[in-house]
Amino acid sequence: MMLNSMRAEEEAMIKGGEEAVAWVKKELCIGCDQCTIVCDDDAIELYDTPMASPIMDVDVNRKAKILRDECTGCKLCVLGCPTDAIIMIDR
Ligand code: SF4
Ligand code: SF4
């Protein structure tokens, strides 16, 4: 219950609607795919990008990209991202 009301407060503070569009802070995105799962409007794609650190033994990392025309400003991806990599900006 307490968590629900904190969640509602958090959601109310984030701007949204048709004047807003989601934006991914690339440096915080870990390519986890949560945002594409919650987005009902197919407005997010993942793309491959080279790993920043050669210490990691994998060739590529994935990052999310917002398709601006498809984004309805619903904010679901902001709430679903575990690393706070998505913010809402003015369209
Ligand atoms: S949920 Fe966040 S960290 Fe995960 S892929 Fe989307 S933007 Fe990146
Ligand atoms: S704000 Fe809504 S429509 Fe836009 S990318 Fe996020 S989940 Fe998809």
Image: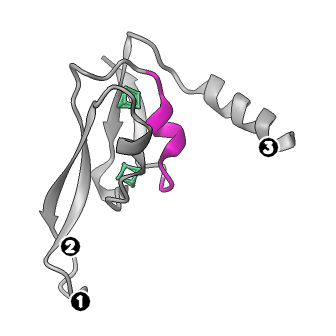
Mark closer to the chain start, 3 or 2: 3
How far, Cα to Cα, is label 3 from label 2?
35 Å
Whether residue 78 appears in magenta in the rendering, the answer is yes
| Front: mark 3 or 1 | 3
Classify 10 Å Cα crowding around label 3: few (below 14), some (14-19), many (20 and above): few
| Front: mark 3 or 2 | 3
How far, Cα to Cα, is label 2 from label 1?
9 Å
Residue 55 shows which numbered tag? 1
When the figure is inspected, residue 60 is found, relative to residue 38, above or below; the finding is below
- Tell me where residue 66 appears, x and y as whole percent: 26, 35
- Residue at the disc numbered 2: 52
When the figure is inspected, residue 39 is found, relative to residue 70, above or below; the finding is below
Magenta segment: 74-83
How far, Cα to Cα, is label 3 from label 1?
38 Å
Is 73 placed left or right of 24 in the picture?
A: right
- Residue at the disc numbered 3: 3
Quadrant of the image containing the N terminus: top right
Element type where label 3 sits in the image: helix
Disc 2 marks which amino acid? Ala
- Tell me where residue 73 appears, x and y as whole percent: 40, 20
Whether residue 46 appears in magenta in the rendering, the answer is no
Classify 10 Å Cα crowding around label 1: few (below 14), some (14-19), many (20 and above): few
Instruction: Respond yes or no on whether mark 1 lies under 8 Å from ligand 1.
Output: no
Q: Residue furthest toward the top?
A: 18
In the image, 48 versus 91, the foreground residue is 48
When the figure is inspected, residue 90 is found, relative to residue 34, above or below; the finding is above
Disc 1 marks which amino acid? Ile
